[in-house]
Image (cartoon, grey):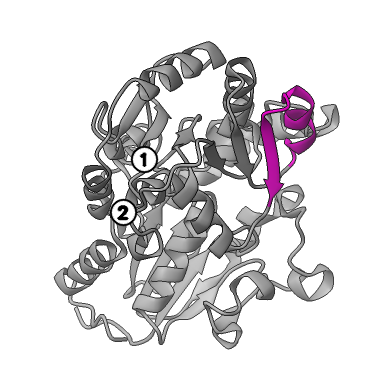
C-alpha cells in the first residue's frame, strides 16, 4: 500500500529532561523533516536540540507556558491527544502515558515507542506514594484510575506497531494491553561518558525526585553507612529526602550536562535504587567504567551483569542496599569490561534498529 508523505513525532511533553525526552530527541534527529507534536515544549531545555519551529504545542502552552506543574493537568491529556488528528504518512509516538492515543489517517503507519503503559493509571498507588500529593489529589487520582485505565487500553489499539524500550515494558504491554511488541532499547551516548579511572570515593545517583524512584533507599543506606553520596536532580520529594539525610549526603539539584559527566567520571559507583523501565543514567555510568548498584528488577536485569558490571540488591529496603554497597566494595571491577556492557546500548545501535524497522515497513528513513 502506498502511504502518504510526511512524518510526525508525537511526544507527551518536553518539560522535564528525562530518558523519554532523550529518546524523542534522537527520533527527531533521525527524522529531521518530521514535525513534532506535543503538549508543552520548554525552549530553554530543548531549544538547542530541537528547532522550536518544528514544534506544535497545545493551546495551553500559549496561556501558561511549559509549566512545571504539568502533572496537575493529567485529566486533560487523554482529551487532547484523542483530539489530535495527524495527517502525516508516518507517525511515531513516544509515550509514557498519552501520545500513543493520537489519531492518524487510515493509510498512515503509526509506530508507538512505549516507555511504559500509563504509570498514572496502572501504578497509581506507587506514583502517589510519599508526601508530595495532598489528600484531595490522592482521592481525585484514585477516582480517575478506572477511567484512565480504560482510555489507555483503548488508545493502545490505535498504533499499527508497538515498540517497547525493554523486556520489562514488553511484558507489561502484553499483560495490560494484550498486544505484542518488539524491543528497541533507549539510546545511550557513550561518547559523552568516556572511560575514567578516577575515583573520588563517593556514590552517585541522578534522578527526578519522585516517590517511585526510591531515592529514599539510597539516602538512608548512605546515611547508615556514613558513605559519601551525591544526589543529582530535583522534584516533589526533595524536602522529604533532605529531612532523612545525614551529613554525608549532598544534594546538588539540577546540574548542567557537563557537570553530570564530571561527577560520573569521579564517582566510585552509581546507585539505581528503584524499579526502572530501563535506566539510562546507570548505563551512562557504566560507559565511564563505573559499576552499578541496582535493585534486581525491571530494566536493570537487562543492563547490569551481577559481579561483572555491578551488583544487585533483592529487597526494596535500605538495609539490602547497604549490604550491596559492602559487596561492591569487596569486588574488583574492570573498567573496560564495565564499559563494554554499556556499548550494547549506544546511540548508534538505537539509530540502526529504527532505520531497520522503517525500511522493513517500506518507509523512507530520510523523510
Figure quadrant of the N terminus = bottom left
Q: Is residue 51 left or right of residue 117?
A: right
Q: On the image, numbered disc 1 is attached to which residue?
A: 169
The residue drawn where x is 36% and y is 58% is 188
Position in image of residue 91 (x %, y %)? 39, 71
Position in image of residue 187 (x %, y %)? 35, 59
Mark yes or no: residue 150 visible: yes
The residue drawn where x is 45% and y is 80% is 87
The part of the chain drawn in magenta is 236-253
Q: Is residue 33 magenta?
A: no
Label 1 secondary element: helix
Could you give the CA–CA distance between mark 1 and mark 2, rounded to whole angstroms? 9 Å
Position in image of residue 224 (x %, y %)? 62, 15
Query: Viewer-proximal residue, 276 or 80?
Result: 276
Task: Say the numbered circle drawn on residue 163.
Answer: 2
CA neighbours of label 2 inside 10 A, class few (<14), some (14 to 19), many (20+): many
Position in image of residue 85 (x %, y %)? 52, 73
Amino acid at each position: 500500500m502506498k502511504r502518504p508523505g510526511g512524518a510526525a513525532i508525537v511526544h507527551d511533553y518536553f518539560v522535564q529532561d528525562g530518558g523519554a525526552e532523550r529518546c524523542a530527541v534522537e527520533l527527531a534527529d533521525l527524522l529531521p523533516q518530521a514535525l513534532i507534536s506535543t503538549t508543552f515544549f520548554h525552549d530553554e531545555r530543548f531549544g538547542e536540540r530541537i528547532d522550536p519551529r518544528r514544534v506544535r504545542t497545545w493551546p495551553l502552552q500559549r496561556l501558561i507556558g511549559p509549566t512545571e506543574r504539568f502533572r496537575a493537568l493529567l485529566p486533560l491529556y487523554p482529551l487532547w491527544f484523542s483530539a489530535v488528528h495527524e495527517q502525516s504518512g508516518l507517525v511515531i509516538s513516544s509515550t509514557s502515558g498519552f501520545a500513543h492515543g493520537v489519531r492518524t489517517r487510515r493509510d498512515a503507519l503509526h509506530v508507538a515507542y512505549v516507555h511504559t503503559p500509563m504509570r498514572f493509571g496502572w501504578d497509581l498507588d506507587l506514583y502517589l506514594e510519599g508526601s508530595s500529593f495532598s489528600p484531595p489529589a490522592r482521592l481525585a487520582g484514585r477516582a480517575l484510575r478506572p477511567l484512565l485505565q480504560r482510555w489507555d487500553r483503548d488508545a493502545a489499539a490505535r498504533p499499527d506497531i508497538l515498540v517497547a524500550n525493554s523486556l520489562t515494558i514488553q511484558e507489561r504491554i502484553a499483560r495490560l494491553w494484550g498486544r505484542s511488541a518488539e524491543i528497541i532499547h533507549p539510546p545511550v551516548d557513550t561518547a559523552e561518558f568516556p572511560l575514567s579511572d578516577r575515583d573520588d570515593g563517593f556514590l552517585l545517583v541522578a534522578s527526578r525526585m519522585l516517590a517511585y524512584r526510591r531515592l529514599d533507599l539510597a539516602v538512608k543506606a548512605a546515611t547508615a553507612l556514613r558513605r559519601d553520596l551525591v544526589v543529582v536532580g530535583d522534584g516533589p520529594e526533595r524536602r522529604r529526602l533532605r529531612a532523612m539525610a545525614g551529613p554525608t549526603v549532598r544534594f546538588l539539584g539540577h546540574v548542567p550536562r557537563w557537570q553530570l559527566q564530571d561527577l560520573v567520571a569521579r564517582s566510585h559507583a552509581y546507585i539505581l535504587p528503584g524499579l526502572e523501565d530501563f535506566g539510562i543514567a546507570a548505563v551512562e555510568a557504566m560507559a565511564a567504567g563505573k559499576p552499578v548498584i541496582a535493585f534486581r528488577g525491571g530494566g536493570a536485569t537487562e543492563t547490569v551483569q551481577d559481579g561483572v558490571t555491578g551488583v544487585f540488591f533483592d529487597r526494596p529496603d535500605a538495609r539490602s542496599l547497604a549490604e550491596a554497597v559492602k559487596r561492591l566494595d569487596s569486588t574488583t571491577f574492570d573498567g573496560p569490561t564495565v564499559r563494554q556492557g554499556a556499548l550494547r546500548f549506544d546511540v548508534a545501535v538505537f539509530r540502526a534498529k529504527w532505520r531497520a524497522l522503517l525500511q522493513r515497513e517500506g518507509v523512507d528513513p530520510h523523510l
